Amino acid sequence: MKKSYLMIAISMTLVQGCYTAPPYQPSSHVSGYPGVSIGISYSTYPDLVRIPGYPVYYAPGVNSNYFFYDGLYWVFQGDNWYASGWYNGPWDRVGYYDVPVYVLRVPVRYYRQPPPYFRGWRADAPPRWGDHWGRDWEQRRSGWDRWDRGSAPAPAPLPTYQRNYSGDRYPRAIEQQRTIRSENYRYQPREPVTQQYFKPRVQQDQRFQDQRQQDQRQQEQRQQDQRFQDQRQQEQRQQDQRQQEQRQQDQRQQDQRQQDQRQQDQRESEKQQVERKRQAEQQQEQRQRDVRQKQQQAVEKQPAERNKRPAQTQQAPGRVRAPGNRATSGPEAVPERGSAAGAPAIGTGTKTAREWPSLAGWQPRTIGGRPRFLGP
């Protein structure tokens, strides 16, 4: 028993928190998964006590949310409802939309193991299932918490015959349980979910098989959708990778073209610099040639002038005083007009400009601050 309580505590710890929607689609009957294990076990028939004003019993001596209503045992465990025709199962999970309203109306104080989200709720009122299971559940189960206590149905009789089946005598096979019940319990249930539960086992097995096939198809469809989505994501990643590689390749090509252009521009610039330098050197060499040529011409011209100047001096050794200037003696003296000496011969002596009809060929010279003409 202690082990069972420990498993219950662990299960309650794992399911802490609120859920806003049922984890599976609801149905109109005892929902799928018959014979599931809910982690509780009872070796003897529990003592059941009726809740005042309700057609529901609860088990104050067990450490679980254990109820009896309309011929079925009901357990609220791990945020799910389970039902069974026998006190120790096997248990079938019941959908949120299918739980009978009288079970939902049981006040909070009769839950022996209330979940954490029950805290703060009124003990004399039913749990606020609409706040917990969401607006859709509240709309579909509208009015579940409003009822006339005077019109409540009579509770179903307790199946006390099950007290004789405890320990090793407890029937485990579903068919054996149905046979014993049909022999000892004549109650006819009112609730649709309870009526559905007690239908022939063949129908339940077929329903369960259909449910499993539907779940399997849904699972396969989800897996197929997931594979398709994964494939699309993979293709998208590959496409993005190819685009990224193409962009990188284009960027590398652009960088290479820019680098080639820079290198070409640099070569052109170097070529232009070399060309400008060559032209500057040519211009410098041309200027130097011109200077040397001028210097050579000047050097060649100077000997000719030196050679020409002594010849002119020998032709006119005497000096001629400019007209109007006279010298009384010496080689510079110029005889006046009417002189007794007469006109000297050309090339000898000196004459004034008046004494010669033409001074062509004479060169002026300044001697002693006075102009003179040297004869030819």
Image (cartoon, helix red, strand yellow):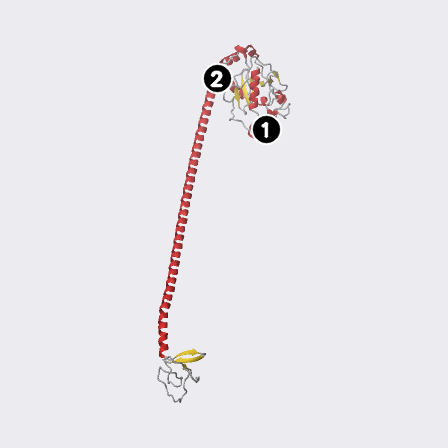
The reply, left or right, for residue 368 in relation to residue 10 is: left
Residue 213 occupies which quadrant of the picture? top left
Mark 1, residue position: 131
Secondary structure category for the residue under label 1: helix
Relative vertical location of residue 300 with respect to residue 73 in this rendering, above or below: below
Q: Nearer the viewer, residue 22 or 266?
A: 266
Residues 137 and 289: in front is 289
Q: Is residue 329 above or below residue 208?
A: below
Q: Position of residue 326 (x, y in %)?
A: 43, 84
Q: Looking at the rendering, in which quadrant would you find the C terminus?
A: bottom left
Instruction: Tell me if residue 46 comes above or below residue 25 in the rendering.
Output: above
Say whether residue 117 is left or right of residue 198: right
Alpha carbons under labels 2 and 1: distance apart:
36 Å
Residue beneath label 2, please?
201
Mark 1: few/some/many CA within 10 Å (<14, 14-19, 20+):
few
Amino acid type, callout 1: Asp
Discs 2, 1 touching: Cβ within 8 Å: no
Chain-order first, disc 2 or disc 1: 1
Residue drawn at 38 percent across, 66 percent down: 295
Residue depicted at 58% across the width and 21% down the height: 103
- Where residue 342 appears, x then y in whole percent? 37, 88
* Viewer-side label of 2, 1: 1
Lateral position of residue 220 relative to residue 63, left or right? left
Q: Amino acid at mark 2?
A: Arg
